[in-house]
Amino acid sequence: MSSIKHVAIIMDGNGRWANKRFRPRIWGHVRGSGVVSDIVKAADEIGLKALTMYAFSTENWSRPIEEVSTLFKLLKKFLIKEKQRIISNNIKFKVIGEIQNLPYETVSLIKEMESLTQEATGLQLTFAFNYGGRAEILRAVNSFQMSQPNRLMTESDLNNLMYRPETGDVDLMIRTGGEQRISNFLLWQMAYAELYFTPTKWPDFSQSEFKKIIEHVSCRERRFGNVCSQDALEQSIEKAENNKTAFVKGVNL
């Protein structure tokens, strides 16, 4: 069985794909929107636990207003078009980020989809929209300080205050389009993620390539800081804490 349970994707290269064909950037986003449905379907078919897709970052507001408007419209179109398929496939849907800045109708559609799928037990599908990794961490820290000002925060506390803690850590992050950056995406959750950068631009990304990447990365040896690949991340962390405690006690004898 594959060790890859949670995949995160930066869907990059839409604008460059369109420019190469002497078309406006928004055409690339329109073509790329169709790929989203294909990849969600593939993720569901292969039994992933979670799929998180970076649709719009907090930095994307600096793009031309026409392009920003198109991205909003495509999100709305996806919610309407894929609603029944998401529900019938037992997919649990959520959007993370500062969605209060989105158009009212889009926010209403998001809330409706989240409500209709809140009891779903299949793929946990997340769109990061108007999202920034640093902002998510700051939001969690500030929330904790306000609610429990006299207690030190633990890793568990921070995990539980993330936008969607139930998806857990990211096992694999894929970025299309050839760039090799994580671009402020799921900074906390990707601490031990495998990274895969493909030159394929998002409108050309296929189910076949997606599955091949997961198969390839599944063969990597993931040690989580240990010398033995057989230990899971939780076991490795526990062993490290025990060894540290034993070492400190030995030094103080």
Image: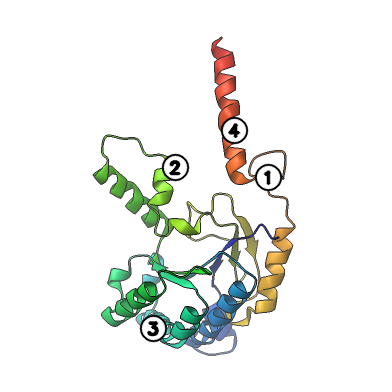
Could you give the CA–CA distance between mark 1 and mark 2, rounded to whole angstroms?
20 Å
Mark 3 near mark 2, Cβ–Cβ under 8 Å?
A: no
Instruction: Give 218 or 87, whichever is nearer the viewer.
Output: 87
**Mark sitting on residue 155:** 2
SS for dot 2: helix
The 10 Å Cα crowd at callout 4, few under 14, some 14 to 19, many 20 or more, is: some
- Asked if residue 57 can be seen in this view, the reply is no
For the point 60% across and 27% down, the residue is 243
SS for dot 4: helix
User: Residue 39: image x %, image y %?
Assistant: 59, 77
Instruction: Give 53 or 117, whichever is nearer the viewer.
Output: 117
Could you give the CA–CA distance between mark 4 and mark 3, rounded to whole angstroms?
46 Å
Q: Which amino acid type is shown beneath numbered disc 4?
A: Ala
Rendered image quadrant of residue 162? bottom left
Could you give the CA–CA distance between mark 3 and mark 1, rounded to whole angstroms?
41 Å
- Asked if residue 110 can be seen in this view, the reply is yes
For the point 54% across and 12% down, the residue is 252
Mark 4 near mark 3, Cβ–Cβ under 8 Å?
A: no
Q: Is residue 48 left or right of residue 160?
A: right
By what rule are the colours in the image chosen?
A: rainbow
Q: Is residue 248 left or right of residue 198?
A: left
Rendered image quadrant of residue 111? bottom left
Q: Is residue 196 above or below residue 108?
A: above
The 10 Å Cα crowd at callout 3, few under 14, some 14 to 19, many 20 or more, is: some
**What residue is shown with label 1?**
223
For the N terminus, give its image quadrant: bottom right
For the point 39% across and 59% down, the residue is 163
